[in-house]
Amino acid sequence: MPIKIEKTTKWVSPVIAIFLWEILAILISDPSILPYPLETFKFWYKLAVEGYMGNTLFQHTTMSLIRVLLGFTMASIIAIPMGIIMGWIRYAESALGTIIETLRPIPPLAWIPLVLLWFGGTSILSQAIIIFIGAFFPILLNTISGVKSTPKILVEAAYTLGTNEKELVRKVVIPSSLPYVITGLRIGLGIGWMCLVAAEFMGVKNGLGLGAMMIFFHGAGIPEGIIVGMLMIGIIGLIMNEIVIFVEKRTLVWREEVGLRLGV
Amino acid sequence: MRRSVKGFLLVIIISTVLFSGCTAKPPEKPEKVKVRLGYLTADLHQLAYYVAKKKGWYEEAGIEVIPVEYINGAFEMDGFKANEIDVGYLGTAPATIKHANLDIPIQILAQVNNEGSAIVVGKDKGIKSVKDLKGKNIGIPGPGTVQHFLLLKALSQVGLESKDVSLVYPMPGKSMLDNLKTGTIDAFVGWEPFNAAAVEGGYGEILITSHEIWPSHPCCVLATRMDFKRNNPETIQKLVDIHVRATKWIKENPEEAVRYGVEFTGRSEEAVRLAMKNIDFAYEPNEEGTKTYLTELLEFGIIKQEKVPDKDQFIRDFFDKSFVEKTS
């Protein structure tokens, strides 16, 4: 019963948001500033079914997803092993710590001018690099924290049972730090997705991508298109987050904390 | 008591004399009219504004210009909408599209330039004619821009279509240069001084100028918010007079104009000199060219049909030539 109620209450806030949007649009009474929800949904349908200037919403979304997943995968491949090394080997952390802490506060978008200069900006690599920078640090730092949080008792027990270091890391440290890594992945994916719009402002092939689409609709004076782009980014971000939570739930069901948080 | 009455009267008389003296004295300088003027970053097409500013012609006419810089015309149109600016130098494309689609109440007072764009190709890309653009990645500022239509026109002139090339957008001018340099695009359709900068940088060459594609096509214009024009017709006349004067001056003093162009755009003297050759600085409103452009925007679906029920009427309402006519 409570789960049923929760499923219904989930939809309360979006309905209220649409209602408030309608009220605000009526108060402003200028669709060129804030279009009405119904007009926006109609345009959304048109964009999805017929497309605009030869590009459909599906094509825009697919290209954006490819860019984000490419950048995110690159970040994961580098940040997770690096985090394990830095978390486990103290010298590695002190050697790399300063440069990491210097680069970390630089916003991903501040790299754009340099990326433009080095790679031009319109290649998929350039856009993936911006997303990579956004996703890299949360994954790295969470992995380091995860490795460092491995309970001492587990490490000592494993040594007592005669395991070597390589096996200890593989069989004890990595599984124990997984919840942290997954949290890092979730944050990294979220930030990567947030960087997407700026990454696509640098120019994309055939104007395909949700960020590029929004810039086009701004130039064309079609605010409905801008809002559709924003909503699509929000909804996909939500879905991606749900997917990571689902994976977390499946793989870490053994962990009491995760079970409690997810209501398992 | 009598003494105090006398003293009171004396004070009244003295202050009255002083006060009347103050009011009777004519003001030394008439108050300047403040005008918020929008223009685009380092756009050589809009050199007339910079020349007029540097020559002190606005001040001379009793106008205090508050400059507002925009990175593109679409943002400048938002500036008009938000009442950030009263007049502005901007491209015909964003002015027409956003005036039509968003009902932003502006009017074109004068032309700023015609032509001034070109298709620029990477030097080592082996592109020798428009036909060679088939299958290439071509940067444009965005769909519906003058540069986009110039490309479509150029392609159709040799029997190619939009689907024969890969368009890359959105792309500001500087980004076009970076991408051509790194080879991520094979060509771009840009405006001056970026075209000349690619040539001067040694990595780009002009394949075809916009003069060859569409002679006398409209480019930048001087526009104003309608309410500002209604309330300040004299100031508008002065601004148009200054614009005409600056445009004529640029044409009559090309060498000196290059110097101003270097200052305005930050580009080298060679690049600016080369760029100036491709720009037709003008002030006579280009209604015919704008109508042709409007027709294409409607066909393309960028401007909503219901917004322009009658093209001729739209153009008539969009232009106010009376100020230029008075100047001439």
Image (spheres, coloured by chain):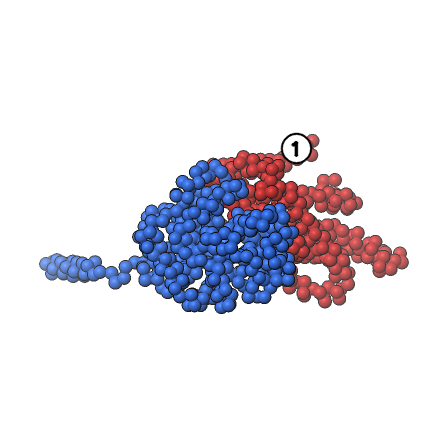
How many residues crowd around disc 1 within 10 Å: few (fewer than 14), some, or many (20 or more)?
Answer: few
Of residue B169 and residue B218, the one placed in the foreground of this image is B218
Residue at point 60%, 64% (across, down) = B203
Q: Is residue A166 above or below residue B290?
A: below
Residue at point 87%, 60% (across, down) = A164
SS at mark 1? helix
Instruction: For residue A131, say whether it is visible.
Output: no
Q: Is residue A143 left or right of residue B3?
A: right
Of residue A209 and residue B135, the one placed in the foreground of this image is B135
| Colour representing chain B | blue
Of residue A175 and residue A115, the one placed in the foreground of this image is A115
Of residue A139 and residue B114, the one placed in the foreground of this image is B114
Q: Quadrant of residue A99?
A: bottom right
Q: Quadrant of residue A150?
A: bottom right
Residue at point 55%, 51% (across, down) = B154
Residue B251: x, y in percent?
40, 62
Quadrant where the C terminus of chain B is found in the figure: bottom left
Q: Pinpoint the chain carrying mark 1.
A: A
Quadrant where the N terminus of chain B is found in the figure: bottom left
Q: Which chain is red?
A: A
- The residue under label 1 is A5
Instruction: For residue B201, say whether it is visible.
Output: yes
Residue B32: x, y in percent?
32, 58
